[in-house]
Amino acid sequence: MSDEGGNHREGQRRWLARWLWLVVWLGVIVLAGENVFSAPAKSSPIDVGYRDFKFPNSAKAPTGEKPESKLWWNDGTWWASMIESSAAGYHIYRLNLSTQTWVDTGVQLDDRLKSKADVLWDGSRLYVASHIFSSNSTLPSTDPDDWARLYRFSYSGGSYSLDAGFPVSINDGRSETLTIAKDSAGVLWITYVQKNNDGKHKVMVNHTGSGGDDDWGTPFPLPVSGASGLSSDDISAVVSFDGHIGIMWSNQSKKKMYFAVHRDGDPDTSWDVLAAYTVSADDHINLKSLHADPDGNVFAVVKTSLKSATDPLIVLLACAGSGACTSASNWRAYTVFTVQDRPTRPILLIDEQNRRLFVFSRNKDSSGDAAIYYKVTDIANISFEAGLGIPFILSTTYTNINNPTSTKQNLNNSTGLVVLASDDSADYYFHNFLDLGEPLPEPTPTATPTATPTATMTATATPTATATNTPTPTATATATATSTPTPNATATPTATHTPTATATATGTPTPTATATATATATPTATNTPTATATATATSTPTAEPTATATMTPSATPTPKPTNTPTATLTQEATSTPTTTPMSTATAIPPNTPTATPTNTTTPTHAPTGTPSPTATPTATPAPTQTPTTAATTTPTTTPTHTVTATPVTGTPTATPTITTIPTMTPTATPQVGGPPVQWHYYFPFVTVETTVTRAPWEFLWGRESRIR
């Protein structure tokens, strides 16, 4: 009875402990909210780049707009203006490069969720020009909450602090974009497009006065031709260069991109203007500058409104030569992406140390998936290869990644390069980092693979020289198979679209032929010979005859990884050559004419014996067309043949184009939906041990837990 009573009391204590634990847990939930047990927001590797934390759905496209910059580099670290889903407004975040994770510093920026920021770090202070976004320019507003604000921060000891007297208002309305620059005299400038009371949309300008960064004048229309009567969708951007302020804007009604120049210290009415690009215009601009550089002073990436597939859609404009970019002869245009690449929202970054220009853009592949791609060119010799470019932020799970953004600053090997983007469908941030001191991956030359795969696959490998995709493993010293529509067995196998094979025959007693085929697509029946093919091989064997056949395709087009089936064919053959060996194999693909290709091989000098190779091809996955192979001979000696075949995708061509997948893809497996929830419990004097995926309520039922 005492044992039973003790067990009963022990059970009561256990149940009491569990219920007390539940009460404490529920109390913590009530006090701390939904994030009590959530792990810190971390970045997860995707196909190319990293997925970061979520942002509020109401903060649409937080990495937009096109000419604006959300990142800066300071004190050996990358920083950003970002907003987390649970945060009340934008904060300053720091990038931990070792974990590729953005860390919230807690420093508040604009608390308006629908605001957009343009960020400038001048080496000593941080300026954040923040405006309320409107997809079209609007009339001035009397509501101060609609006005743009300037925040200024000082930096010390690894942290930022808001300066006294800030933020200050810098305009009187909403706008699609607003950018900021600082001239050589220390004057801050902003520009944006606004609808005026006269009903016209105009380029607007404002700047600080003699009183300092918090002393702003009244915004005024840019006093030059082409800056009024704009579309409500047009935008402007500002840049500082070589003692000047430059303003570029789109005028879609006139199909031109204009550039106005103001010398630092001149009156507000003193401007030079020209049309920098007269082919077409759209509201996508991103400006950068180099100071006193013979290869260029001002660079811009802009978007056109052209429609044909090969028309330029993203164009780099470069101003070089003497003068202040006020002459049309100073400007040159270079196509970066064409209409068929479906690019949009480009940004430009300058690697000053290595003399390179980087253009990033949201492009779409052949399946319509959106990702961030880039191209790079030397500053002194500007030229861009055709095609989508190099993927920089890409996910097969998140297919609406858009709005790349980075910094106004020029870069070098110490800074590296960081681009931030966002997906409005999933409400996630994404980013990637590029070490500028390392070699760059090769670009993808076209938007789709050069060779187009067919619907079916016929992979045939036999130990004899037949009209199939495999060479004839015989006792000859040298065999050549060309798997064109009429195959020939000559000295060295060469294939235009068929697999590469390497065959080696030695005088060992038991030959084994092993063919391994990896195919993204294989030729249809039209590529299978429809007539009897005769292959003849001439050999001069020695005591140990050696046959080497190498079939290496000159190119391997690379489609999307999801379109790549893999077939592995394995043949084992035993053959013994005779004085006059003859082997005949008949392959009948299902969709070929009734003619049976037959290959007869008669070596000029052959050892005694009659070869009898027997081959059993095995394919995984099985191709839709399965060849039937028959071969019968009688072996006496047994050379060994090893064949390795790699089918190549697409329609055969004389020289397929090599398509290279860039090496930027992380080795980590794409993560869908985030990591499993891990539960961590902390109570005074109590430690709970459980499986990492165990939910708190499971402790009530005593599953794999103990309390001590």
Image (spheres, rainbow, N blue to C red):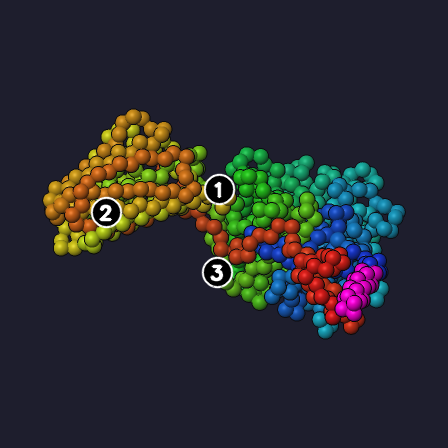
Q: Are marks 3 and 1 in contact (CB under 8 Å)?
A: no
Name the residue located 48 percent from the left edge and 48 percent from the top edge: 444
Given this view, does label 3 or label 1 mark the residue nearer the observer? 1
Q: Which residue is mark 1?
A: 563
Residue 305 in the image: state x and y as whole percent: 61, 37
Dot 2 crowding, Cα within 10 Å, few <14, some 14–19, many 20+: many
Give the secondary structure at mark 2.
Answer: loop
* Disc with the residue nearer the chain's start (2 vs 1): 1
Question: Which quadrant of the structure image shows residue 12?
Answer: bottom right
Give the quarter of the figure containing the C terminus: bottom right
Name the residue located 68 percent from the left edge and 40 percent from the top edge: 251
Name the residue located 55 percent from the left edge and 54 percent from the top edge: 669
Choose between 470 and 207: the one closer to the eye. 470
Give the secondary structure at mark 3.
Answer: loop
Name the residue located 62 percent from the left edge and 64 percent from the top edge: 99
Question: Is 489 placed left or right of 191 in the picture?
Answer: left
Residue 131 in the image: state x and y as whole percent: 78, 51
Q: Are marks 2 and 1 in contact (CB under 8 Å)?
A: no
Give the secondary structure at mark 1.
Answer: helix
Q: Which residue is mark 3?
A: 439
Q: Amino acid at mark 3?
A: Pro
Q: CA distance from mark 3 to mark 2?
A: 49 Å
Q: Is residue 618 magenta?
A: no
Given this view, does label 3 or label 2 mark the residue nearer the observer? 2
**Mark drawn on residue 574:** 2
Q: Amino acid at mark 2?
A: Thr
Q: CA distance from mark 2 to mark 1?
A: 36 Å
**Residue stretch rendered in magenta on the structure:** 1-23
